[in-house]
Image (cartoon, rainbow, N blue to C red):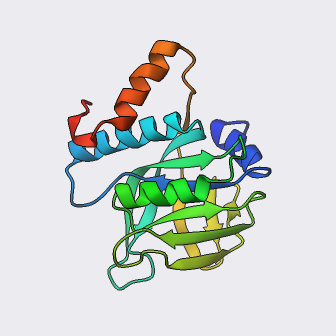
Amino acid sequence: MSDSALHQAWKYMQVHYSGILTARCEKYTQEENAKRSLSLTAKLRYLEYFILKVNGSYIECHGSDHAREVDAALFLVVDIADSGCLEEKLCELGVEFEQESILSIAAGGTEGKLIGTSCRSNGEIKKLSNPLFDENGEVVNHDGHPFMLSGNDRIVEPLKTVNGRWGNSIAANAKWEDLSV
């Protein structure tokens, strides 16, 4: 792995808890999913996590007869402040953004779990065997790879100005439907 944004995220994941989620939902249009992604970005920034936004794919309805791979903007989130509440916040956001599950990864990147956040799978936990980055930047496990991160990664920079944080807080507290893309 090169010294890319993904590599920086990997280094953070060695010492901090992390997770992956998306705002994409198949029942929404491309424009609506773009607004949802913008809203999720604002909420994660507001919580002051390290955020890496990547193009990638994940398995929707993982483990079911309806499973299929879909492309989406994925957010790799690292709790660099070690607040201790990343998993809880990602689960809340998973529910809010109508996700089947979120991926929670313990510090070190060797223990992870998919946590169900939908009505059908709420609270269901599927432990993953040794999730880690391989040389292609994929988060893999012995059961397959529910998330694949690839290309066009970019760090979502923390906001450094008062006006930037103020504007972000407005976006973070707005309904995603009211945002413009």
Is the residue 153 above or below the residue 104 in the image?
above
Tell me the residue at 72%/71% (across/down). Answer: 130
Residue 70 vertical position relative to residue 63 in the rendered view, above or below? above
User: x, y percentage for residue 88?
Assistant: 55, 59
Residue 52, percent from left and from top: 56, 41
- Any part of residue 152 in sight: no
- Taking the spot 74% from the left edge, 50% from the top edge, the residue there is 16
- The correct choice, above or below, for 110 with respect to 92 in the image is below
> Disc count in the image?
0
**Front residue of this view, candidates 91 and 27:** 91
Please tell me in which quadrant of the rendered image residue 153 appears.
top right
Residue 10 is left or right of residue 153, and the answer is right
Q: Is residue 15 left or right of residue 30?
A: right
Q: Is residue 94 left or right of residue 18?
A: left
Between 143 and 44, the one lying in front of the other is 44
Which of the two residues, 53 or 163, is positioned nearer the viewer here? 163
Q: Residue lying furthest bottom in this view?
A: 65
Residue 7 in picture, x, y percent from top left: 70, 43
Which residue does the image show at 27% across and 30% down from the upper left?
181
Q: Position of residue 174 (x, y in %)?
A: 30, 36
Q: Is residue 173 left or right of residue 164?
A: left
The residue shown at (36%, 43%) is 37
Say if 164 sits above or below 113 in the image. Answer: above
For the question of whether residue 15 can be seen, the reply is yes
